[in-house]
Amino acid sequence: MTPFRLLLLLAVLDAPVAASAQNSTVRVPGPNSSALRSPAVPKPLHPNWIFNPSDSVAKIRPTYWKEGAVVGGAVGAVGFGLMVGAICGLSESETGCTGKALLGGLVGGVVMAVPGALIGGLFPKAPRKAEHEAAE
């Protein structure tokens, strides 16, 4: 049997059976609606969200993401600088490792500032006294 005939046979066997007139309680489900099949409903353009932003942004509580970025950057700069300096010092051919250690510290500070900011963003700041009194 050729693959085409086998595919045709499987398609016929898998087809849904129509409900008979004698058994009206059996329902054959129709095709599901799709966003691709539904007619597009034109919506008017409303630029009001640009001029009247929602106040949901004001509800975001401040976090310690900036402080976390500074701490993570400092730890990364010192750690990577010392590591690159130590690795460069083990080399027999290199004599001056200061520039490489500074470059390693710079790269380490930039790289480790991102996880520091993400970790600092997990901790919300306590509300200030002026904000707390204004809310009451």
Image: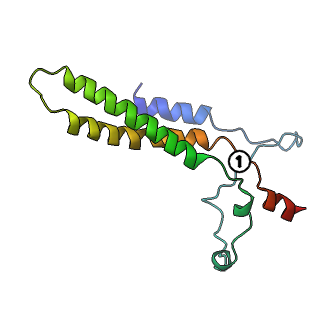
Task: Identify residue for label 1.
Answer: 125
Residue 77 position, x and y percent, is 38, 37
- The one nearer the camera, 61 or 8, is 61
Image point (15%, 33%), residue name: 96
Horizontal side of residue 114 vs 28, given as left or right: left
- Horizontally, is 55 left or right of 111 in the view? right
Q: Which residue is drawn at 19% across and 19% down?
A: 90
The type of residue carrying mark 1 is Lys
Expressed as whole percent of the image width and height from the top left, the position of residue 81 reads: 32, 33
Residue placed furthest toward the left: 93
The colour scheme used here is: rainbow
Q: In which quarter of the image is the C terminus?
A: bottom right
Whether residue 49 is visible here, answered yes or no, is yes
Instruction: Judge the density around disc 1: few (<14), some (14-19), many (≥20) Cα neighbours within 10 Å.
Output: few
Secondary element type, mark 1: loop
Q: Nearer the viewer, residue 23 or 105?
A: 105
Quadrant where the N terminus sits is top left
The one nearer the camera, 95 or 54, is: 95
In the depicted structure, whether residue 30 falls above or below residue 111: below
Give x and y (percent) for residue 79: 39, 30
- Report the residue at 75% width, 48% height from top: 126
Compared with residue 76, is residue 31 higher up or lower down, i.e. above or below? below
Q: In this view, does 91 lie above or below 44?
A: above
